[in-house]
Amino acid sequence: MGAEQPLILVVDDEPAVREVVCEKLSHHNFKAISAANGKEAFKLIEEANPDLILLDLRLPDIDGMTICQQIRRRSRVPIIMLTAMGEEVNRIVGLELGADDYITKPCSLDELVARIKAVLRRSGTAMGLPETGEKLKVGGLEIDMEAAEVLVDGQAANLTKTEFTLLKTLAERPGKVFSREELLRAVWGYDQYDTHLVEVHIANLRGKVERNPRKPERVRTVRAFGYKLCAV
């Protein structure tokens, strides 16, 4: 993240939304820039290197899903999606494409700021400043805490910051069954929220650490309880 004031890119086609969100963020010691469409967003991502992107899924030129997918091909910058009420399918697809979190519009500005702070806090932990140089090894997985890198059977895995934190949480206590609610608190910092957030990120993680994601051996489901990491 930025050294003092994290830089937030707000991508929304409504001028009033961009203005009020950027103003609110500035009051909370963030720098904020905005884009009205996908073309502007990609330009600002290249030029400004934001610490977090607040991305509306409904844009006039390039849809938010495509933007999210293209960002994830080259960057691990945290992404929070803005979705309309009732767009559950879009939320799930967006998370599958690599978004870290979502918030439903209309929402309170205070909730939006709290969510941004939580994601930034989590991504900072995930990137892990060199405090211990610790490495975790669970079977064929090796997690370098200092470098925020993961090797899967000796090959580098390109995890997002949220996926890294999720895997780290499971790997710190291999064999322990974590409920979805426990993972929500440990990884996202939420006491209560949609457990789809956990389920979709578990599926994404399996796609990167399992030999066969359809028959997971490492990140296993314990029916009616949750998930555990096994040494395989």
Image (spheres, grey):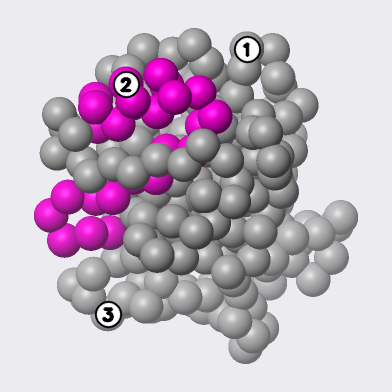
Say which element carries label 1: loop
Please report contact status of discs 3 and 1: CB closer than 8 Å, yes or no: no
Residue 179 in view here? no
Residue at mark 1 to residue at mark 2: CA–CA distance: 20 Å
- Mark 1, residue position: 85
Q: Alpha-carbon neighbours of circle 3 within 10 Å: few (<14), some, or many (≥20)?
A: few
**Residue sitting at 29 percent across and 41 percent down?**
32
**For residue 15, what is the image quadrant?**
top left
Q: Earlier in the sequence, mark 3 or mark 2?
A: 2
Does 221 sit left or right of 77 as displayed? right
> Which residues fall within the magenta stretch?
1-25
Where does residue 192 sit, x and y in percent of width and height? 45, 19
Closer to the chain start, of discs 1 and 2, is: 2
The answer to whether 129 is drawn above or below residue 21 in the figure is: below
Residue on which the image places disc 3:
133
Image quarter in which the N terminus is found: bottom left
Which of disc 1 and disc 3 is earlier in sequence?
1
The structure residue drawn at horizontal position 64% and vertical position 66%, both measured from the top left corner, is 73
Q: Note whether residue 155 is visible.
A: yes
Mark 1 Cα shell of 10 Å, populated few (<14), some (14-19), many (≥20): few
Quadrant of res 114: top left
Amino acid at pointer 1: Met
Against 193, is 184 above or below? below
Q: Which residue is mark 2?
A: 20
Q: Amino acid at mark 3?
A: Gly
* Residue 66 position in % (x across, y down): 71, 48
Q: Nearer the viewer, residue 68 or 204?
A: 68
SS class, disc 3: loop
